[in-house]
Image (cartoon, helix red, strand yellow):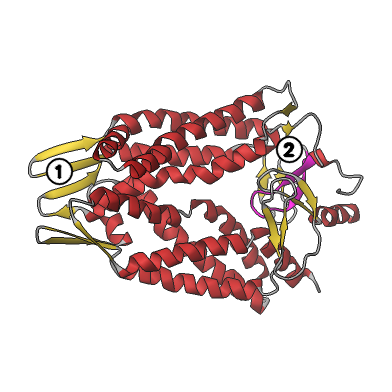
Amino acid sequence: MPDKYIDESTLLRCPICEAVNRDREGDIYCHRCGSRIFRNPKLTTSRAWAFLITALILYIPANLYPILVNEQFVSKKGNTIIGGIILLWEEGSYPIALIILVASVLVPILKFIVLLYLLISANLKKHRYTKVDQHKLHYMTEIIGPWSMVDVFVVAILTGLVHVGTIRVIAGPGATAFVLMVLFTMFAALSIDTRLFKEKGSHGSD
Amino acid sequence: MAIKMDENQVLDRLIICPKCHTIHQKITISKGKNAKCDNCNKILYHYDERILDHGLALGITGLILFLVSNLFPLVRVEMLGHEQHVTILSMIFSLLENGFYVVGVVVAFMVFIFPLMILIVYITISWLMIQKKGKSLTKDLLILLSKLLPWNMVEIYLVSILVALVKLIGYMQIHFGLSFWSLTLFVLLDIYLSKSIHIGELWELRHRIYDAR
């Protein structure tokens, strides 16, 4: 129950120092840490769109090119992300196949869907309230997002470790595209303007 | 100007839940207790009298564990008499040698440079605030700290080591190195550190230490 003369809906949380600030016109500087925490929402939204579209484009080569290359004697065999998951499943490593499936396929796709939803819903100014808690959704994407790096780290470890005798494992071109894809989705999630999120329910809670 | 000051003081008594954005009024809690969001149960803050001592101790312990994790091999594999081992740095160099500059540099930042910077920043902030020195430096370091935190991925890296090893079972003999265990401890400590020390509390403490007089 904040003081009566402050309108709850104008309160913002500084993403840097967590201080509570008031929404004002134009650029907002946090009163505690002095960082410029919010700018013109149009500018940040188009930036988030740019990052998201870049990530979506990078997701294509990340899946088409091999992420891992096995070299044995003279033969070279590349594995794409999906190919690697199928191979693991056929070998019977079900838990690992599931971990990779969740981390490298489901998490990025889920993140794309959530970010697209948040950005599109921010553009539609009609409704002020939604059934979905958009703040929670955004928080969740920030938590699960980095886990899509699992496959890249696995490739990095295998590149450093497996150089035994005639067998060698090195990263493939898909790994570069995948890393950039993860980076750009994280940039997109960080640059979304949380002021554009709609309140849950029909009226303000609490 | 006086009105604006008052407004900030009022605002500083409020806290917004990072998870569900519910607005709460801060209350005083007793030692060792957590204040939780009544909507989503997320811990908002924690009362720790000796937060700086704890930050300093955990930071230094983390630094030692991190150094050990980088001095010795993480894993060793054996196959038909051939042997190979890997450390965090050798892994990064082998990516760079094979021409994977983007992957190499990004991985280097996420599992080596950022975690190391976070530890050094924690230690410096705690030490400066205990000494009540460096008012503007602590501000810059706290801003740097919250920008670094989302990019630290050591815990994901640890899981990835296990995933990578499962792929090698059946082909090679696998031996865990000393660094694997110290990295595991480091990750546990890192999780504890991020759960027990909230950035907002450090900012409040900074305000009390330097602006109280």
The disc label shown at residue B46, or none: none
Q: Chain of mark 1?
A: A
Does label 2 lie on the same chain as label 1? Answer: yes
10 Å crowding of disc 1: few (<14), some (14-19), many (20+): some
Report the magenta residues as a range.
A10-24
Q: Horizontal and vertical percent for residue B129?
A: 65, 73
Residue at the outermost left position: A74
In this rendering, the answer to whether A206 lies above or below B173 is above
Q: Horizontal and vertical percent for residue B117?
A: 48, 63
10 Å crowding of disc 2: few (<14), some (14-19), many (20+): few
Q: Nearer the viewer, residue A26 or A132?
A: A132
Query: What residue is rendered at 78% in x and 65% in y?
Result: B29
Amino acid type at circle 1 is: Glu
Q: Horizontal and vertical percent for residue B7?
A: 86, 52
Say which quarter of the image contains residue B176. bottom left
Query: What residue is rendered at 23% in x and 52% in y?
Result: B169
In this rendering, the answer to whether A66 lies above or below B182 is above
The disc label shown at residue A71, or none: 1
Q: Nearer the viewer, residue B115 or A129?
A: A129
Q: Which residue is mark 2?
A: A26
User: Marks 1/2: CA distance?
Assistant: 57 Å
